[in-house]
Amino acid sequence: MKPTLVLVGRPNVGKSTLFNRLTRSRDALVADIPGLTRDRHYGHGRIGHRPFLAVDTGGFEPLVKDGIVHEMARQAEAAIAEADALLFIVDGRTGLTPQDKVIADLLRRSGRPLHLVVNKAEGMDRAVVGAEFHELGCGEPRVISAAHGDGVNELIDLVLEAFPDEEEQKGDQLSGPPGIRLAIAGRPNVGKSTLINTLLGEDRVIAFDMPGTTRDAIEIEFEKNGRQYTLIDTAGLRRKGKVFETIEKFSVIKTLQAIEEANVVVLMLDASQDISDQDAHIAGFIIEAGRALVIAVNKWDAVDAYRRERIKIDIERKLNFLGFARVHYISALHGQGIGGVLGSVDKAYAAAMAKLTTPKLTRALLAVVEKQGPPRHGLFRPKLRYAHQGGSNPPIIVIHGNALDQIPDSYTRYLERSFLDIFKLQGTPLQIRFKSSTNPFDKK
Ligand SMILES: Nc1nc2c(ncn2[C@@H]2O[C@H](COP(=O)(O)OP(=O)(O)OP(=O)(O)O)[C@@H](O)[C@H]2O)c(=O)[nH]1
Ligand SMILES: Nc1nc2c(ncn2[C@@H]2O[C@H](COP(=O)(O)OP(=O)(O)OP(=O)(O)O)[C@@H](O)[C@H]2O)c(=O)[nH]1
């Protein structure tokens, strides 16, 4: 599982600056997807080979007892409880403040792994800046400049040392239960629990693993139509007699983690409500994670023809970047449309895991370029020579050639669409990566 790093600190210490720096590499991958709105508080990061999730808790003022600031503090506390590691940010220029001490107490009591980060220290002596913060009792102060990047990679390397790296994690997944790993994501009250109970009803459950620690995701294996699935929980399911119920409130972090762990995500929307920012943000996480996707518009039984038309238009308008996913209109309550959703889950999984050979990919590439070549850039026209598969879930297509760094995003999107179309991959996004060979004539 990707570790979740939660940034905490009083206002203005540089949390957003650090968050932006940590998540920028991933932003580049998805920045140009039209219509995608980002949640500025949750993001993907990667340092070297080590991926993680980053959470910015916003200005944390634990002493305020009501109003919006209090609500933010409450959300920050939820994030703290779910963190794999806490980065407690303080301001090296302002120095130690009474509020830092209050926050330090709270963080120490959480029992989560804690790292003290002294920010804004560019051009300053690390030992001198860090010295006064020892008093907080949060371990060795790590001195950085979020704005300039000084010490940031070292800090994250150190924080991530405690977690297994990607290769070990892959090994873990292979030894896990067989079948499609499925997550059901959606904002509160869309009907996730109802769908889960409909899916898991009638004793189809093979195994229900209670987690060993609070950090482990709950996984439920079940079987339907002779196929095996593993449901990855997003909100703390508990079995009560024959039905499952959620024991926790909606948790963005749990949702993110479940999306990461899944092969295919079912995004649930509520037909009786307009598409909200929260829907769009969850959709954004799914895209960022590169997961295969099926959309289930729930409560179809409860809405009239006018609403039905309206929600279709709303999806088209606000979630148009999910155009690759099949949409099903269902009633989780009455068990209608569920078979169709699972059928699309199977297809999306097959598409996400498709094996594409180099000759087939290269033939497809050349045909696509023949139909429409990349635009000329200055003296150069990028030359696309051959393609091979660089990964799956999502399929990654690596294209080799010359001057490929000059290819505009619009052309990359054209290539993506064309490959999805040619190989009939429905339900998965696809990533294109370019590898330019160095020109042997350059050195002469
Ligand atoms: N000199 C210096 N300034 C920084 C650094 N990091 C952030 N800042 C500045 O500090 C101010 C606050 O930064 P933010 O990232 O917005 O701080 P924050 O903790 O997210 O603030 P809230 O959103 O209010 O909680 C901005 O003016 C930043 O430019 C740094 O490494 N060095
Ligand atoms: N009419 C109708 N109501 C539904 C349907 N599915 C769920 N509901 C109702 O919607 C409400 C919320 O359903 P839940 O399954 O608890 O929603 P949830 O997404 O799990 O919500 P959280 O537990 O808050 O995350 C309940 O009152 C359900 O009875 C449906 O298909 N049709």
Image (cartoon, rainbow, N blue to C red):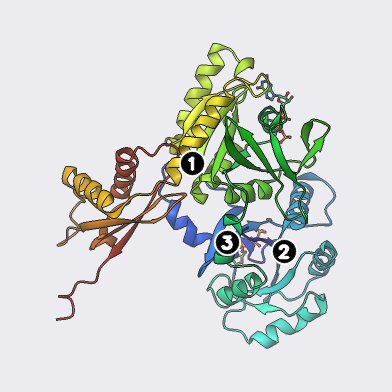
Identify the residue under disc 2.
9
Quadrant (top left, top right, bottom left, bottom right) of the C terminus: bottom left
Distance CA(mark 3)–CA(mark 1)? 20 Å
Find residue 224 and report its horizontal and vertical position in percent: 60, 31
Q: Label 2 sits on what residue type?
A: Gly
Mark 2 vs mark 3: in front: 3
Identify the residue under disc 3.
171
| Residue sitting at x 52%, y 50% | 289
Quadrant (top left, top right, bottom left, bottom right) of the N terminus: bottom right
Q: Which of marks 1 and 2 is nearer the N terminus?
A: 2
Mark 3 vs mark 1: in front: 3
Count residues near mark 1 (Cα–Cα under 10 Å), then give few for <14, some for 14-19, many for 20+: many
The image quadrant of residue 158 is: bottom right
Q: Are marks 3 and 1 in contact (CB under 8 Å)?
A: no
Q: In which quarter of the image is ligand 1?
A: bottom right
- Front-lying residue, 98 or 305: 305
Count residues near mark 2 (Cα–Cα under 10 Å), then give few for <14, some for 14-19, many for 20+: many
